[in-house]
Structures are given as C-alpha cells and as structure tokens.
Image: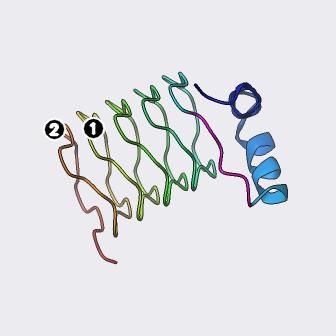
Amino acid sequence: MANDKHVALLKKGVAAWNEWRAKNPDIRPDLREANFSKADLSRADLSLANLSRADLSFANLSVAHLNRADLTCTNLSGALLNTANLSEANLTFANLSFANLSWAHLGGARLSKFERGAALRLASFQQ
C-alpha cells in the first residue's frame, strides 16, 4: 500500500508536490497502488517514486520526471507521457496501450513484457 501522506500531498497539486520533493530529495515516494487516473501530473517530479500497480490511466504526465521510477505493473493506458523523462524507469508489465510517449526519454528503461499499442513516435531510447 502507498504512503497515505505521499498520496495526499500529490493530490494537492504538482506545485506543492515539487516543492516538497525539492526539500526532501532523499525520500523515495511510495505511491504503490494509488489511483491517479485522469490526474494532471504534468511537470511532476516523480523520480525514484514507487508507482508499482498504480492507476495512471489517462493521466497527464507530460514533461514529468519519472527517471528511475518503479512503474512495474502500472496502468498507463491512454496516459500522456510526451517529453517525459523515463530514463532507467522500470516499466516491466506496465500497460502502455494507447499511451503517448512522443519525445519521451527512455534511455536505460526496462520495457520487457509491456502491453503493446503505445505510441512511441520519436521517443528517445539513447543512454
């Protein structure tokens, strides 16, 4: 289960979340199994976050920082991930059907066994 304080803080908005992250860079946010379906998380600093089994379907994660995040078994169907930083993220078994990853940075990301159908146009896979 997710840390209730982390979930509540992210639901306050990206500005409050990013301010907290800047003040607490050593904390690894625990957002496991949380529901952020259709949430506007654009530009959120979710680097190193544990988002395994979370529902991020149809969420706006444009320009979000998801580097080294754990997205194992996460539902990202229909999510906007354009220009997001997913470098070294774990996307094993993630549902990326109809997700938009245009211009996303995926260098070093683990994409094994992800759901097919993601829009990977112009995504960057460079290290």
- Residue 122 coordinates in the image, percent (x, y): 25, 62
Quadrant of the frame with the C terminus: bottom left
Count of residue discs: 2
Residue 108 in which image quadrant: bottom left
**Does 74 appear in magenta?**
no
Q: Amino acid at mark 1?
A: Leu
Residue with the mark numbered 2:
117
Q: Amino acid at mark 2?
A: Gly
Q: Residue at x 57, y 47 (%)?
A: 49
Q: Element at badge 1?
A: loop
Q: Nearer the viewer, residue 67 or 63?
A: 67
- Residue 101 coordinates in the image, percent (x, y): 32, 50
- Extreme-front residue of the structure: 1
| Disc 1/disc 2 C-alpha distance (Å) | 7 Å
- Residue 85 coordinates in the image, percent (x, y): 46, 60
Task: State if disc 2 and disc 1 touch (CB < 8 Å).
Answer: yes
Q: Nearer the viewer, residue 30 or 86?
A: 30
Examine the rendered structure and indicate whether residue 1 appears above or below residue 25: above
Q: Residue at x 55, y 56 (%)?
A: 65
Residue 6 in which image quadrant: top right
Residue with the mark numbered 1:
96
Q: How is the image coloured?
A: rainbow
Magenta part of the chain: 26-31
Q: Element at badge 2?
A: loop
Callout 2 crowding tier (Cα within 10 Å): few <14, some 14–19, many ≥20: some
